[in-house]
Structures are given as C-alpha cells and as structure tokens.
Image (cartoon, helix red, strand yellow):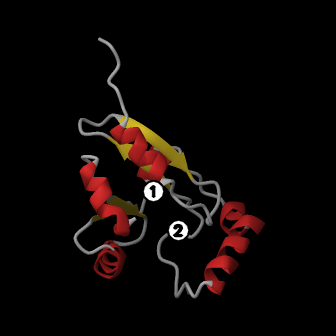
C-alpha cells in the first residue's frame, strides 16, 4: 500500500496501520516498513473487536493461508518472525474525514490481501446522503 500512497492522499485520505504488538514492535514496523506513516498498536485488541475482525487459528493456519504463504515464499518473501497475536486477522477500513466508514473489508484468512482499489473508489465516488 505504501507504493500507492500518492493515490491514497489524492483521495483525501491517509494511510494508518494498527497492529496488536508492543509499542516497541509498532515502532520497529514503522521504521522498517512504514516510514512517515502513522502506526498505532492495540495489544488488547479492542479496536479489532470493535470493528468485528476475526481471531481465528483456522484463518491463520488453514489451507488457503498456507497456500498464500507458499506463493509468497516462491516469490522470494520470507517471514522472519511474528509479533503480536498471530491468530488475529486484520482488514482494511476506509474512513472519511469526520469518521464516516465508507468501506470495510474483513479478512477471513492470513493470506487475504487488501482491496485498495475498492477502498479508494469508495472514498472518491462517495455521494453524501440527502438530508
């Protein structure tokens, strides 16, 4: 998503990551993978619960997640460790200024990828409801 930061900003949005590791782990993630991007952490996972995101052993270790891991491995990506709750699944939430949620994608497995095109379209093409 960092590679599309310009598009995100052009849509009037900003990119924010929320993890569930320690504050030190969030800082490490930011410095290595998201310099200049806000990174927050919620070790108690209250944000995930409020958004309805799943915590699932099967979602993390199930066949589709393992297949995605194998595809990534074949492409040269290597996971060097796990920080935070390994069974907490994430998602992509597009929130407009003022707090209105315009797009929600809740991951069903660890191999799910965010649909940034759909999220950006929801931000750019949104029409406010009639008063």
Secondary structure under tag 1 reads: loop
Q: Residue furthest right?
A: 63
Hey, which quadrant is residue 63 in on the image?
Answer: bottom right
The residue to which callout 2 is attached is 85
Secondary structure under tag 2 reads: loop
Q: Position of residue 129 (x, y in %)?
A: 35, 19
Q: CA distance from mark 2 to mark 1?
A: 9 Å
Position of residue 81 in the picture relative to residue 36 (left or right): right
Q: Is residue 45 above or below residue 94?
A: below
Q: Dot 1, crowdedness within 10 Å: few (<14), some or many (≥20)?
A: some
Q: Dot 2, crowdedness within 10 Å: few (<14), some or many (≥20)?
A: some
Position of residue 89 in the picture relative to residue 100 (left or right): right
Asked whether residue 29 appears in the rendered view, the answer is yes
Q: Is residue 1 above or below residue 81?
A: above
2 and 1 marks in contact (CB < 8 Å): yes
* Image quadrant in which the N terminus is located: bottom left
- Looking at marks 2 and 1 on the same chain, the residue that comes earlier in the sequence is marked by 1
Q: Position of residue 58 (x, y in %)?
A: 72, 62
Hey, which quadrant is residue 87 in on the image?
Answer: bottom right
Q: Residue at x 51, y 53 (%)?
A: 115
Hey, which quadrant is residue 79 in on the image?
Answer: bottom right
Numbered disc total: 2
Q: In the drawing, what numbered circle is on residue 45?
A: 1
């Amino acid at each position: 998503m960092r590679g599309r930061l310009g598009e995100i900003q052009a849509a009037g949005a900003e990119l924010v990551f929320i993890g569930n590791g320690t504050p030190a782990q969030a800082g490490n993630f930011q410095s290595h993978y998201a310099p200049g991007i806000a990174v927050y952490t919620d070790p108690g996972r209250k944000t995930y619960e409020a958004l309805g995101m799943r915590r699932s052993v099967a979602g993390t270790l199930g066949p589709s997640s393992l297949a995605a891991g194998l595809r990534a491995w074949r492409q040269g990506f290597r996971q060097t460790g796990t920080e935070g709750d390994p069974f907490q699944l994430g998602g992509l939430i597009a929130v407009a200024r003022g707090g209105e949620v315009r797009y929600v994608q809740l991951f069903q497995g660890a191999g799910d990828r965010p649909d940034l095109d759909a999220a950006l379209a929801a931000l750019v093409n949104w029409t406010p409801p009639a008063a």
